[in-house]
Amino acid sequence: MVPDERGYFGEFGGRFVPEVLIPALEELTEAYRWAKEDPAFQEELHCLSRFWSGRPTPLYEAKRLSELRGGARIYLKREDLLHTGAHKINNALGQGLLAKKIGKKRLVAETGAGQHGVAVAAASALLGLQCVVYMGEEDVYRQAPNVNRMQLLGAEVKAVTSGSKTLKDAINEAIRDWVTNVKSTYYLLGSAVGPHPYPLMVREFQAVIGREAREQVLALRGALPDYVIACVGGGSNAIGIFYPFLNDVQVKLVGVEAGGQGLDSGKHAASLAAGKVGVLHGAKSFVLQNKAGQIQATHSISAGLDYPGVGPEHSYLKNTGRAQYVVVEDSQALQAFMLLSNTEGIIPALEPAHAIAYALNLAGSLEQDQAIVVNLSGRGDKDMEIVSKMLEVKQ
Amino acid sequence: MTHIASVFAGKEHAALIAFITVGYPTLEATLEAVPLLEKCGVDMVELGIPFSDPLADGITIQQASQKALQNGITPAACLEAARLIRQKTDLPLLFMTYYNPVLCYGPDLFCADSFRAGIDGLIVPDLPLEEAGLLEEITCRNNLDLIYLIAPTSPEDRIRQAAQRSRGFIYLVSVTGVTGMRKDLPEGSAGFAARVKRFSDKPLCMGFGISTPQQAALVAGSVDGVIVGSSIVHLMGSQRDWKPAVSEFVCSLKKAIMESGK
């Protein structure tokens, strides 16, 4: 059973945070244990997930996309159809409810692409909680529509100007806020990263994706899929869909990291492919860092994958060999973005476009009776500006 | 008794501990600052190893760290700086560092090299009791003190553990918050210190947010050492000729502590 009592997945995870936060993490671990077993909490979460978020999401067979390569059938887990447009709402709602139960009135969160920020802002509005979202200045600019949505939902968006001005710095600022206001404030971390119990808790709130997908694919095909594929930044959508398949050893699990402009260019965000074991944001995991142990600047076309660390459970799954991690570059993701839009009428977020790109290539090498499930973790409206700019440059 | 602990032995007044970021604003400044601090009556110096993601630090030390990194400062450069500083002073020297640079350097080698460079102890703000077992053992083997932090939020069992395991002194974090200059310190630092004293007779030093002589004097009455960082770092970076300003400020801190009585 991972994680263990101390929050370790094998050698990864733990709690590398200032002393001032340890009691808060203890309290959170206790509260989470209670919530997991409490029927009333689970019922409330279930009802809101259904009537407010829009669960369950469909598993859709992308026939025209599959035909492009003529190999395996590709099924899309349609998290893009959820309220606020991405899987992030599953975790934001779960943790938001938990925060309310333990009497916190103020939520802080970080956001990269803005999807988690929007989800937390929406959950805060629903639950009547105050909400502050930290967002790297560069992301504020490249994901402007999400900034407007957060503000409309009543959240205060604080632009972070320190460091690389992206997701990692937003997490630093959110943690600093939490350290300062720990008594009144709940830190609603959006990915399967951070100190224990966050990687566990985020996995559990996201595992609904994999539970549904597993049932749905069995109902559609009468058999489990050959592959389950998801993109990995911090890794919450991936761990959410992987987890319920972990014991199905015949199902291959593939996480797709952001290759940016290529691993050789140094401009990428592939922590598992090119990082080494380190400590970032409270957990031991694979981290992109230089020779002196300084965290490296990352690059990805998708803000949501632009992160130099990765959830500790992914490091564990990589080292045990249960999951395989691959890399897809910006240009391939962009191509997949266009293809899915044109063949299926679905505009994906740039993050899962990485997973689509890998699935398409893989499908061609498989037989027609094989199946791939891809987690389509979010929709692409937020990326329109970036994509049109990229296409202009190309023309 | 370790070199660090000896600072507090038989002292009538609280010790003054200064923090500076290695390589800020320049490496030369770091080398010149320590003798200057000693002349003003500083009893111990914390040398901050800059890190790209200092999540326990406020804006002053964040910016100083970033500048130091731009100046090319690495843990290896900090070790070399410590070696040079050690030639000029007998004051106890501490490294304040986040854990990742230590992990990357190799904890064994880092501690051995630190000792060789003349470092007396380590403070690692993102390494709480649960995670520090390995480093505790390695620092022990290398004759370094590993200093633990206790926060206002720490419950009794954690205070007891930290007090028992901390070597050299115990670091009391004065506020729930990050480092940095503050107008007002929270009330109750005396009560906090008294709470910790129930579990330990080790020296207690308080830091985070102490930025004026008045604040230093206020805290000095109830602890064995006062740690001042951000305001010194700020002065070092704010003007080209920082020495007179730093000298005046640190001397005023010392004077306030001496006059505060104990």
Image: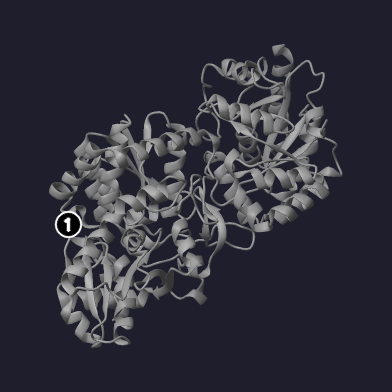
Residue at the extreme left of the image, as rendered = A51
| Residue located at (52% from left, 61% from top) | A286
| Residue located at (16% from left, 75% from top) | A344
Which residue is more in the foreground, A86 or B235?
A86
Q: Is residue B62 left or right of residue A225?
A: right
Query: Where is residue A65 drawn, in percent x and y?
Result: 20, 80
Query: Where is residue A134 drawn, in percent x and y?
Result: 37, 45
| Residue located at (16% from left, 79% from top) | A63
Which chain is mark 1 on? Answer: A
Location of residue A278 (image quadrant): bottom right
Q: From this view, report whether residue A41 is shown above or below residue B212.
A: below
Location of residue B130 (image quadrant): top right
Quadrant housing the N terminus of chain B: top right
Q: Please say whether residue B25 is visible from this viewpoint.
A: no
Q: Is residue A114 left or right of residue B261?
A: left
Q: From this view, report whether residue B52 is shown above or below residue A368.
A: above
Which residue is more in the foreground, A18 or A10?
A10
Query: Where is residue B72 drawn, in percent x and y?
Result: 66, 57
Query: Where is residue A143 drawn, in percent x and y?
Result: 30, 57
Quadrant housing the C terminus of chain B: top right
Which residue is more in the foreground, B94 or A313?
A313
Where is mark 1, residue-wise?
Answer: A56
Instruction: Please state which amino acid type lies under the numbered disc 1.
Output: Pro
Q: Secondary structure at mark 1?
A: loop
| Residue neighbourhood size for the residue with mark 1, other residues' Cα within 10 Å, grouped as few (<14), some (14–19), many (≥20) | some
Q: Is residue A15 left or right of residue A377?
A: right
